[in-house]
Image: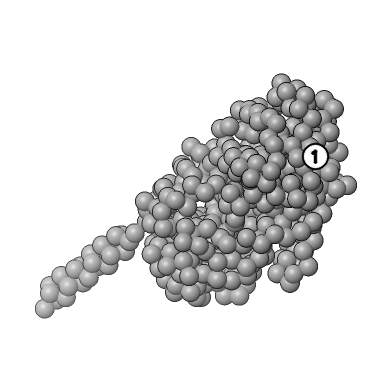
């Protein structure tokens, strides 16, 4: 009888070991008393200011959620991986988060190029991925586990083109973009199509390579065209340099850009040269809606500074994901994915629902760079 009990005990122990070791990728993140959610973002490199803002927003969200009891009684933990804004690094980070840290989902990556690299990996491992800032349309095409809580480049490019043609009365435009960056190239293509459709004329389109710092050769060609507007769809660290070099050459065109312009560090790089520009964004810190004012108050209390869009958008992505996990009542990938599919709610950057391609349907705002500040101009519905 004793031998039978021992044998039975060994059998049960082995069974428990087998079942606890055979979970799907990511399932371990919820078994240790806390739910781990991975974050892929650039904490170092040329756009590290974005990554740090994203982390601030998510750290704030983590505290808010855990102070209220977490998700169904379990604390959450955002586990960060630095992708340096390099696709290869993003892939390595994502694989570590999934296979070693056992996260149940991923927020990010922050940039489109890195998001395009990670999306197939998340899809293959059935790990829900929600990017709050990757605007390239290809990202969610990787599969049904991939979502985004921001608008996409075709919408953003069309909005700024129509604003240039209608509000600014621009007849001619020049474009200067990074041909090796999915985000920059996508916005340039969509702006060009929309500006032409509105009756405008693209008088010049020039390209450069990622990490270039001298744009004078391209700007010399652009200067001769005397365009009403110059569209520069890239991140703050690059467009700040472009603006300074353009003004130094005597180019008087009104600068236009996308959401990559939104960073306080834009002024550190571009100085007064960026004043007078307009760009599309997802939210404005000067919006008076309750969601925005509450978020800003909480953020200022914790960090003593005003949040930029990267803080707000990653906060939103994390919030949508957390609310979906709560609704699912489970932490397996399929349950979270299905809850995301039916999500509808209002976050800092506005009301969000998802279309059939898992892209957020939401409004865009136009921002004017004025006196080293970002002024809200108008909100444009999809």
Which residue corresponds to the image point at 50% horizontal and 73% vertical from the top-left? Answer: 326
Measured along the vertical axis of the image, is residue 217 above or below residue 277?
above
Q: Position of residue 284 (x, y in %)?
A: 75, 58
Mark 1 neighbour class, 10 Å CA radius: few under 14, some 14 to 19, many 20 or more:
some
Name the foreground residue: 46 vs 342: 342
Measured along the vertical axis of the image, is residue 206 above or below residue 294?
above
Q: Position of residue 86 (x, y in %)?
A: 54, 37
SS at circle 1 = strand
Which residue corresponds to the image point at 64% horizontal and 57% vertical from the top-left? Answer: 313
Q: Position of residue 345 (x, y in %)?
A: 59, 71
Residue 268 can be seen, yes or no: no
Residue 159 can be seen, yes or no: yes
Residue 362 appears in which quarter of the rendering? bottom right
Q: Is residue 19 left or right of residue 340?
A: left
Name the foreground residue: 14 vs 287: 287
User: Looking at the rendering, in which quadrant would you find the C terminus?
Assistant: bottom right
Name the foreground residue: 218 vs 67: 218
Q: Is residue 95 left or right of residue 368?
A: left
The residue under label 1 is: 254
Q: Position of residue 372 (x, y in %)?
A: 85, 46
Which residue corresponds to the image point at 74% horizontal and 69% vertical from the top-left? Answer: 289
């Amino acid at each position: 009888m004793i031998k039978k009990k021992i044998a039975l005990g060994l059998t049960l122990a082995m069974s428990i070991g087998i079942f606890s070791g055979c979970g799907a990728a990511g399932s371990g993140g919820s078994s240790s008393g806390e739910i781990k959610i991975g974050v892929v973002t650039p904490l170092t490199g040329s756009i590290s200011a974005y990554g740090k803002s994203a982390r601030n927003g998510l750290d704030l969200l983590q505290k808010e959620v855990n102070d209220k009891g977490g998700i169904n009684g379990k604390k959450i933990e955002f586990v960060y991986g630095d992708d340096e804004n390099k696709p290869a690094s993003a892939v390595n980070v994502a694989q570590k988060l999934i296979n070693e840290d056992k996260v149940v989902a991923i927020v990010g990556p922050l940039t489109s190029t890195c998001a395009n690299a990670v999306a197939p990996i998340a899809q293959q491992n059935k790990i829900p991925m929600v990017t709050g800032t990757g605007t390239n349309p290809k990202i969610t095409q990787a599969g049904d586990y991939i979502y985004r809580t921001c608008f996409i480049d075709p919408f953003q490019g069309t909005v700024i083109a129509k604003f240039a043609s209608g509000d600014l009365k621009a007849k001619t435009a020049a474009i200067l973009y990074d041909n090796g960056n999915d985000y920059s190239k996508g916005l340039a293509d969509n702006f060009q199509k929309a500006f032409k459709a509105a009756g405008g004329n693209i008088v010049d389109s020039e390209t450069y390579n990622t990490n270039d710092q001298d744009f004078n050769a391209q700007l010399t060609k652009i200067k001769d065209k005397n365009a009403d507007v110059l569209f520069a769809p890239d991140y703050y660290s690059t467009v700040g340099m472009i603006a300074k070099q353009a003004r130094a050459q005597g180019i008087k065109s009104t600068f236009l850009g996308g959401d990559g312009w939104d960073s306080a560090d834009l002024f550190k790089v571009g100085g007064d040269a960026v004043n007078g520009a307009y760009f599309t964004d997802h939210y404005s810190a000067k919006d008076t809606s309750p969601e925005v004012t509450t978020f800003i108050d909480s953020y200022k209390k914790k960090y003593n500074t005003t949040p930029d869009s990267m803080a707000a958008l990653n906060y939103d992505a994390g919030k949508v994901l957390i609310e979906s996990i709560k609704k699912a009542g489970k932490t397996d990938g399929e349950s979270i994915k299905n809850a995301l599919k039916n999500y509808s709610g209002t976050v800092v950057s506005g009301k969000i629902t998802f279309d059939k391609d898992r892209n957020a349907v939401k409004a865009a705002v136009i921002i004017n760079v004025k006196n080293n500040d970002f002024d809200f101009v108008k909100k444009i519905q999809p």
